[in-house]
Image (cartoon, rainbow, N blue to C red):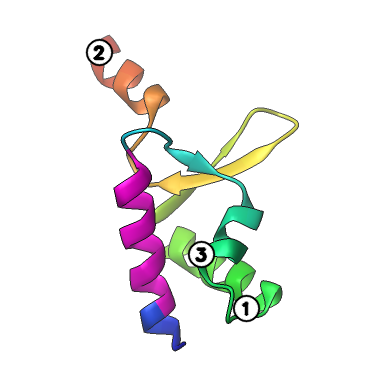
Amino acid sequence: MTEDEARQLILETLKAKSKSKSKFYLKDFYAICPDMKNREVKNLVNKMVMEGHLEYWSSGSTTLIGLKGMGKQHAEEDQAE
């Protein structure tokens, strides 16, 4: 699997699951791209965060990753404005 194929697969999978879940653990990304080594997936996710496709969310003890601008906290922020 090439990096572009993995990138597309990640975005499609997250969009498909966005109705029920907006944030994912890094290990969930390993399952999305089982052909890639964990380190490669981690580096790809970090690159996608830097490019603005994904974003990190932290509760203080746990870090989750989701599509940029998606999720409950964004809906609450939009209502506050």
User: Residue at horizontal 40%, vertical 72%?
Assistant: 7
- Along the line of sight, the residue nearer the viewer: 79 or 22: 22
Whether residue 16 is in magenta: the answer is yes
Between circles 3 and 1, the one closer to the viewer is: 3
User: Residue at horizontal 47%, vertical 58%?
Assistant: 49
Q: Which residues are magenta?
A: 6-18
The C terminus, quarter of image: top left
Q: Is residue 69 visible?
A: yes
Q: Main secondary structure of the magenta part?
A: helix
Mark drawn on residue 75: none
Between circles 1 and 2, the one closer to the viewer is: 1
Q: Quadrant of residue 27?
A: bottom right
Q: Which residue is mark 1?
A: 40
User: Residue at horizontal 59%, vertical 71%?
Assistant: 41
User: Residue at horizontal 50%, vertical 69%?
Assistant: 47
Bin the neighbour count of mark 1 within 10 Å (Cα to Cα): few under 14, some 14-19, many 20 and up.
few
Vertical arrangement, residue 20 with respect to residue 68, above or below: above
Helix, strand or loop for disc 2: helix
Under mark 1, the amino acid is Glu
Q: Earlier in the sequence, mark 3 or mark 1?
A: 3
- The percent coordinates of residue 14 (x first, y second) are 38, 52
Under mark 3, the amino acid is Ile
Q: CA distance from mark 1 to mark 2?
A: 38 Å
Q: Viewed as shown, does residue 55 lie left or right of 63? A: left
Q: Which residue is mark 2?
A: 79
Mark drawn on residue 32: 3
- The percent coordinates of residue 64 (x first, y second) are 59, 42
Bin the neighbour count of mark 2 within 10 Å (Cα to Cα): few under 14, some 14-19, many 20 and up.
few
